[in-house]
């Protein structure tokens, strides 16, 4: 089955408090709870077509919210991003965030009950694994015997068995921190210092998560985090992996701990900053405990970098199921920004960096701008949205039907959540914050007082969600499950066939010798009233798929969702010479199934 991963951000999935005050507290803005993710909610996600739920941000993170009653006082504000804190500044790898619980003292039981509900709904559960860094104030309440840094030689920058990198030259340096100038929450005092890294004996500053080895950190640094040491010196590239570094063993205990609680897999943050030797060993250990444990890598390897992993294939060789296909996402964004053409996207999809089934395709995740956020031409692709939720009708079929590999859907994408508003630490940048207490005002219409029935959605939002549901159902089509992919752009061009406009983009998915082909056709003509033309099938594709004799062409997906409309009945020769007719509305994609007649 093709994995359909639903990124469920616990902090705001079930939050129906729409106050959304900038820099609002937990009390003011509210917060989603584990109990909000009810059986009804999970059944609705299953019906949407979801197979895996990624519980984003559920681990205990650094925060300005005080839980002294649970042994977790508020962190030093100089090393926290936002009132709530970043999901990726982990304060305790063996604990969950008390914000998400009805009773903080009973937080692990509430989390375990949620996992049981996820499994009962026929879904798998993923959580974050953040191997590259931890919160500067890391302090485990659950497993204090396994605290990072205990037993380190703090006199050395790099030692195999140190958990951290210590900035010891010159001696006596003190960590200096500066926050973004826009972030000035009321009642919070900043002094630019952090007591644990004040340069006193045994307390030198530590390297920062973004491979920073300076002691003066600015707002572009991951200043809330400390870089972890896996036996790879990120400064000079030297390695010490034998015997196994202590960090390897500790992280294996982290993974084993969550597997024992029923977690089925892990989304691994910034995986290219961690050596592939570690990944190979860790995933092997995890799969001895659970042979089908699922691992996906958020990674952006660069062959010209100093990072320990420089190529996507290294992740697949290490045992990952899939890696983010960031180049595909960025290329679509660049098409919308009028920086590249369909041909660039076609080249990327025809010649992917690894086998297609090992790529995670997406149009949104928590790091990226929402589809519905404005198009921005002045910055790079990461600084722009797609301008409208309508773009999903055009682009989601291209991404989601590309292979039998995983696809990722961020909560709120299915109803056109725009990521609008200045939340606090996060600015009005088209993203839904992962630093602040907040809710998704459009998504609240689907939550509808925790009925999870969409009763508060507009007709346009209901139609969009219906479309995504039909598309996710089509992801399990036998032709999508097959390995066959055939880019049709080279064959369907106006210089070959005058009735094939250059703004039509198409590709085929199939299982070899099946007598069946699925065709995706998208209209890329800007502000068109609809684009018509003919799509032809190359004889080589017909041979691979064993299309012969009479072939029927059915429309199976359009903007209205699932369809079953006979478009044409043609011979293979007619498919090659004259093709089948299409009429694609503005900013849309249609999906067709070609099958040998019986």
Image: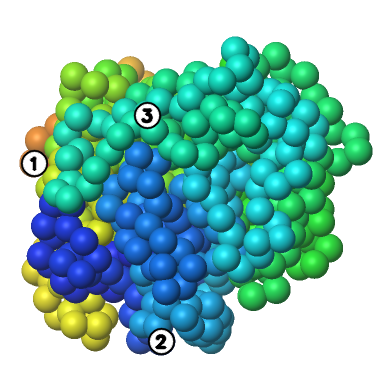
Callout 2 secondary element: helix
Label total for image: 3
Residue 8 visible to the viewer: no
Instruction: Give the mark, 2 or 3, whose residue is nearer the N terminus.
Output: 2
**Residue 111: x, y in percent?**
50, 77
Callout 1 secondary element: loop
Instruction: Give the mark, 3 or 1, whose residue is nearer the N terminus.
Output: 3
Q: Nearer the viewer, mark 3 or mark 1?
A: 3
Residue 546 in the image: above or below residue 36: above
- Labels 2 & 3 near each other (Cβ < 8 A): no
Residue at image coords 14%, 37% = 374
> 189 or 9: which is nearer to us?
189
Q: Please tell me the numbered disc located at residue 177.
A: 3
Q: Residue furthest right?
A: 243
Residue at image coords 65%, 61% = 144
Which residue does the numbered mark 2 point to in the structure image? 39
């Amino acid at each position: 089955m093709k994995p359909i991963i639903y990124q469920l951000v616990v902090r705001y999935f079930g939050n129906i408090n729409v106050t959304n005050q900038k820099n609002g507290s937990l009390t003011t803005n509210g917060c989603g709870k584990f109990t909000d993710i009810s059986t009804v909610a999970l059944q609705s996600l299953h019906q949407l077509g979801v197979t895996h739920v990624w519980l984003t941000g559920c681990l205990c993170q650094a925060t300005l919210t005080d839980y002294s009653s649970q042994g977790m006082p508020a962190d030093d504000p100089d090393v926290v991003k936002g009132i709530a804190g970043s999901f990726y500044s982990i304060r305790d790898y063996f604990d969950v965030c008390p914000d998400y619980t009805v009773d903080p003292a009973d937080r692990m039981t509430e989390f375990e009950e949620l996992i049981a509900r996820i499994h009962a709904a026929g879904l798998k559960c993923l959580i974050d694994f953040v191997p590259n860094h931890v919160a500067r104030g890391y302090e485990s309440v659950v497993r204090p015997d396994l605290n990072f840094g205990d037993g380190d030689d703090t006199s050395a920058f790099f030692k195999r068995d140190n958990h951290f990198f210590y900035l010891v030259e010159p001696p006596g340096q003190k960590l200096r921190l500066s926050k973004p100038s826009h972030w000035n929450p009321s009642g919070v005092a900043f002094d630019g210092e952090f007591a644990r890294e004040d340069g006193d004996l045994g307390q030198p500053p530590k390297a920062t998560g973004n491979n920073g080895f300076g002691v003066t950190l600015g707002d572009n640094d991951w200043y809330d985090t400390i870089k972890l040491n896996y036996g790879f010196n990120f400064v000079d590239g030297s390695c010490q992996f034998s015997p196994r570094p202590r960090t390897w063993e500790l992280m294996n205990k982290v993974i084993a701990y969550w597997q024992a609680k029923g977690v089925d897999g892990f989304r691994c943050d910034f995986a290219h900053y961690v050596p592939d030797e570690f990944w190979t060993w860790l995933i092997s250990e995890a799969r001895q405990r659970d042979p089908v444990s699922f691992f996906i890598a958020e990674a952006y390897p660069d062959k010209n970098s100093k990072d320990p992993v420089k190529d996507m294939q290294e992740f697949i060789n290490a045992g990952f199921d899939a890696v983010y296909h960031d180049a595909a996402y960025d290329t679509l964004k660049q098409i919308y920004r009028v920086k590249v053409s369909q041909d660039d996207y076609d080249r990327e999809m025809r010649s992917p960096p690894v086998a297609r089934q090992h790529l995670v395709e997406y149009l949104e995740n928590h790091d990226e701008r929402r589809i519905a956020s404005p198009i921005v031409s002045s910055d790079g692709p990461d600084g722009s949205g797609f301008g409208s939720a309508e773009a999903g009708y055009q682009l989601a079929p291209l991404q989601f039907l590309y292979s039998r590999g995983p696809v990722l859907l961020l909560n709120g994408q299915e109803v056109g959540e725009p990521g609008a508003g200045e939340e606090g630490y996060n600015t009005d940048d088209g993203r839904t914050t992962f630093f602040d207490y907040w809710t998704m005002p459009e998504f609240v219409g689907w939550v509808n007082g925790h009925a999870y029935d969409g009763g508060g959605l507009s007709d346009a939002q209901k139609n969009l969600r219906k479309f995504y549901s039909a598309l996710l159902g089509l992801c399990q089509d036998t032709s999508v499950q097959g390995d066959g992919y055939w880019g049709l752009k080279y064959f369907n061009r106006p210089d070959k066939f005058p009735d094939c406009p250059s703004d039509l983009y198409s590709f085929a998915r199939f299982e070899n010798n099946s007598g069946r082909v699925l065709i995706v056709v998208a209209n890329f003509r800007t502000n068109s009233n609809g684009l018509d033309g003919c799509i032809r099938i190359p004889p080589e594709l017909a041979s691979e798929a064993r299309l012969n004799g009479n072939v029927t062409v059915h429309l199976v997906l359009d903007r209205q969702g699932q369809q079953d409309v006979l478009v044409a009945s043609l011979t293979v020769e007619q498919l090659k010479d004259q093709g089948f007719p299409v009429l694609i509305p503005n900013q849309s994609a249609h999906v067709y199934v070609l099958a040998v007649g019986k």
